[in-house]
């Protein structure tokens, strides 16, 4: 379980996260939704210890990431796979070396064993390993790159996988494939998935829980049904994609 308590993050004089409280339940798929620039990616970066909070705590299986020393952080990172929103892959490395990276970092597998795992994992995310393994990221389509990034995130079979906008900018069919893959991986390997998204269709298809970030706080949390029936006017405007309604209710909320 990941428990985020009173997470606050200030960049310069800009308060991005004011008071984020969120529990990520084991073996479930939790979506974090919210408008652009609200701090969704910032939350993920705190969970893996890439950013230090201004205040607050994040417990991963009871260990506070925000206070972890280097060694503890290394252990925590071993059980969390994550994909960045942009530039998820190392441009100067082949897909093979990108996906092999966590194995080289965290295991003592032989090159032969690494190859077996890399090829298996590429196939798992629906890529033709023989075709793509020795290509560079720029030689792949956007959808293929997202899948390769996912392969790298899951290759250690981590307990937690954090996906930052895995379907943004992709066509509906590829988006559906990626969503199905997330569901399949979560169920098959008893993983716990956190997905940041703007894609309501994919969210409603696959989420166990939905959290909505607004103005530095999680203002809604529940199952898909509960989220769909939210009475919060900000959430309603978001679901309806109604900017006029949103601006009206946002003003009233201040
Ligand atoms: N390292 C940083 N230094 C300064 N400001 C930052 C940094 N990282 C993020 N921010 C600011 O924090 C805010 C939230 O950014 P973040 O990327 O977390 O938003 P987001 O919800 O993921 O948005 P999007 O949906 O567009 O990806 C933005 O205003 C951004 O400019
Ligand atoms: Mg983001």
Image (cartoon, helix red, strand yellow):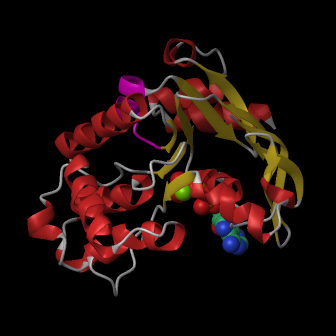
- Residue occupying the far bottom of the picture: 92
**Residue 31 in the figure: left or right of residue 204:** right
**Residue 19 in the figure: left or right of residue 127:** right
Q: Quadrant of ligand 2?
A: bottom right
The N terminus appears in which quarter of the rendering? top right
Residue shown at 56% from the left, 28% from the top:
210
The total of numbered circles placed on residues is: 0
Residue 37 visible in the displayed image:
no
Instruction: State yes or no: residue 201 in magenta.
Output: yes
Question: Where, by quadrant of the figure, is residue 181 drawn?
Answer: top left
Q: Nearer the viewer, residue 218 or 118?
A: 118
Residue shown at 54% from the left, 42% from the top:
159
Question: Where, by quadrant of the figure, is residue 73 drawn?
Answer: bottom right
Q: Nearer the viewer, residue 215 or 148?
A: 148
**Residue 170 in the figure: left or right of residue 186:** left
Q: Which residues are magenta?
A: 197-206
Where residue 114 appears, as percent x and y from the top left, is 32, 67
- Residue occupying the far right of the picture: 55
Where residue 4 appears, as percent x and y from the top left, is 77, 41
Residue 110 visible in the displayed image:
yes
Where residue 180 appears, as percent x and y from the top left, is 29, 34
**Position above or below: 28 against 199:** above
Question: Where, by quadrant of the figure, is residue 9 drawn?
Answer: bottom right
Q: Nearer the viewer, residue 241 or 220?
A: 220
Q: Main secondary structure of the magenta part?
A: helix
Instruction: State yes or no: residue 220 in magenta.
Output: no
**Position above or below: 112 against 206:** below
The C terminus appears in which quarter of the rendering? top right
Residue shown at 52% from the left, 27% from the top:
28
Residue shown at 32% from the left, 37% from the top:
179
């Amino acid at each position: 379980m990941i428990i985020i308590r009173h997470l606050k993050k200030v960049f310069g004089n800009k308060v991005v996260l004011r008071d984020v409280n969120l529990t990520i339940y084991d073996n479930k798929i939790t979506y974090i939704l919210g408008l652009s620039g609200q701090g969704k990616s910032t939350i993920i970066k705190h969970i893996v210890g890439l950013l230090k909070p201004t205040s607050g705590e994040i417990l991963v299986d009871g260990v506070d990431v925000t206070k972890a020393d280097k060694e503890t952080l290394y252990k925590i990172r071993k059980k969390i796979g994550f994909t960045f929103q942009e530039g998820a892959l190392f441009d100067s490395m082949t897909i093979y070396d990108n996906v092999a990276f966590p194995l080289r970092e965290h295991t003592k597998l032989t090159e032969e064993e690494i190859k077996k795992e890399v090829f298996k994992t590429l196939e798992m995310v629906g890529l033709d390993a023989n075709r793509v393994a020795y290509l560079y990221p720029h030689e792949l389509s956007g959808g293929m790159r997202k899948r390769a990034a996912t392969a790298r995130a899951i290759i250690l079979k981590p307990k937690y996988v954090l996906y930052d906008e895995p379907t943004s900018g992709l066509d509906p069919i590829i988006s559906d494939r990626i969503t199905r893959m997330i569901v399949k991986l979560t169920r098959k390997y008893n993983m716990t998935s956190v997905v940041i998204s703007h894609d309501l269709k994919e969210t409603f298809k696959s989420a166990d829980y939905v959290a909505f970030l607004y103005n530095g706080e999680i203002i809604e949390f529940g199952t898909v049904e509960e989220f769909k029936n939210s009475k919060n006017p900000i959430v309603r405007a978001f679901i309806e994609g109604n900017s006029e309604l949103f601006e009206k209710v946002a003003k009233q909320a201040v």
